[in-house]
Image: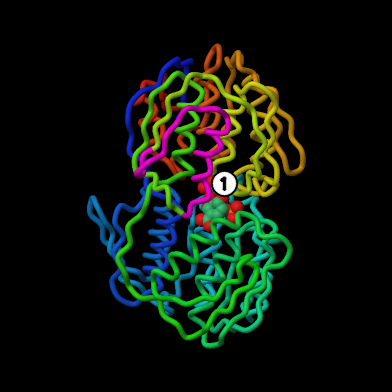
Amino acid sequence: MKAIVKPTNRLEGTINALSSKNYTTRYLLIGALAEGISTIYYPAHSEDSDAMRRCIRDLGAIVEEDDEKMTIRGFGTHPLPVKELNVGNAGAVLRFLMSIAAFCPDLTFINAYPQSLGKRPHDDLIVALQQMGVEIEHNQGKLPITIRGGRPRGGKIQVSGNVSSQFLSSLLFMTPLLEEDSEIEVLHDLKSKVIVGQTLEVIEQAGIRIEASADLMHYKVPGRQSYQPQKYVVQGDYPGSAAILAAAAVTNSDVTVLRLEEKSKQGEKAVVDVLRAMGVQLTHENGVVRVQGNQRLKAGEFDGDHFTDGVLAMVAAAVFAEGTSRYYNVENLRYKECDRITDFVTELRKAGADVEERQSEIIIHGRPQGVAGGVEINAHFDHRVIMALTIVGLRSGQGLVIRDAHHVAKSYPHYFEHLLSLGAQIELVEE
Ligand SMILES: O=C(O)C1=C[C@@H](OP(=O)(O)O)[C@@H](O)[C@H](O)C1
Ligand SMILES: C=C(OP(=O)(O)O)C(=O)O
């Protein structure tokens, strides 16, 4: 599908935030790891959350659903000895399940997206699992990956946090189930640290005890624990909503997004403060964000690691700000669905933006007068690139054509529908 995004002066209306992808994948996983029936209210429906649902079903969980909820009868520490799993293009699903695969005799994660997930590195988790006695065959740290587990050992485990927090989260989900107690030490830096808070939150909701150091670099994990089946309610998704809020910020608008809890542990809730710092008129009360955009934005400098999945949407807004903006500490954007620095900057430049890249930074010289547009954009298989370039297209002279825009469904299948309901001029054409 291609999205033809046309210049749009005004956005107006109210939408319900989509349900959080990251909470949904976590609740599905811990539901599968519990013996008994867990219930998840308002789960996300996206390619990534569907991938987790499909994989836990393949591994033996019984999942039923209606309009409002899913119930899961888990398999505990006894997944079926399946031979193959397809995680689609979902990094978190792959990484979380690589540790669970250590309970299976011989499981291969296939390479279904060679041009996206197939290029992403998983070495740090592979090395950690090998320390636990798990045998792993891999393609230089990339898919396909075969895990020959059986009885993984706890004890002292070291994992690098330099590339992704998902490796640590994966070990935190799995180690409480081991016979031995474990001590996990994070080596180097821990990127996307805030998201580890979501992992610890859901693990605790399922009755598991983990002692974490204040800096989240050391963990004591007692073994022989079991996940309790529980009822979970999925909150609204800040990373996806960040794109709607940014679209409202670059247009003349009066847009309200519901279901965005102020007390959420999602790091991307920081986008509300980023937009405020950029001079956008907005309020955030009782789970409701209201943006009244007037197209005027100020540049700013932000540590993007605190809101990793919201950075691209904020950069898109900064394209129209007065002055030069800088997003720093974002090197790990290079290891996502595409290289979210080089590939993203390339597409922004095509659209007419004045942007520069550094190894771990994106620098934006704002153009309050708008950008030219009138070109075709390559989505690079990346939902967040698609969302961000759509925002830019709304304030371009001649619009933008975004190829392969269906990949938006990785996290936010209703993105275009939501923007259309707010009055965005977008045409969706099957290719
Ligand atoms: O734990 C998670 O669910 C996620 C962690 C983050 O990845 P990194 O830790 O690789 O930055 C984030 O970008 C991703 O969308 C989801
Ligand atoms: C990077 C993302 O997801 P994942 O790492 O799970 O593929 C994302 O949702 O932006």
Q: Position of residue 288 (x, y in %)?
A: 36, 39
Q: Is residue 273 magenta?
A: yes
Quadrant containing the N terminus is top left
The reply, left or right, for residue 53 in relation to residue 177 is left
Above or below — where is 29 with respect to 348? below
The number of callouts visible is: 1
Residue displayed at 53% across by 50% down = 267
State whether residue 390 appears in this view: no
Q: Is residue 44 magenta?
A: no
Q: Position of residue 419 (x, y in %)?
A: 39, 28
Question: Mark 1 sits on what residue?
Answer: 307
Q: Is mark 1 within 8 Å of ligand 1?
A: no
Asked whether 31 or 63 is in front, the reply is: 31
Residue displayed at 48% across by 58% down = 86
The reply, left or right, for residue 14 in relation to residue 80 is left
Q: Position of residue 422 (x, y in %)?
A: 36, 25
Question: How many residues crowd around disc 1 within 10 Å: few (fewer than 14), some, or many (20 or more)?
Answer: many
Q: Position of residue 289 (x, y in %)?
A: 40, 37
Read off the magenta span: 265-288
Asked whether 285 or 111 is in front, the reply is: 285
Where on the picture, by quarter, is residue 79?
bottom left
Above or below — where is 221 with respect to 284? below
Above or below — where is 10 with respect to 236? above
State whether residue 280 appears in this view: yes
Amino acid found under the numbered disc labelled 1: Phe
Residue displayed at 52% across by 61% down = 197
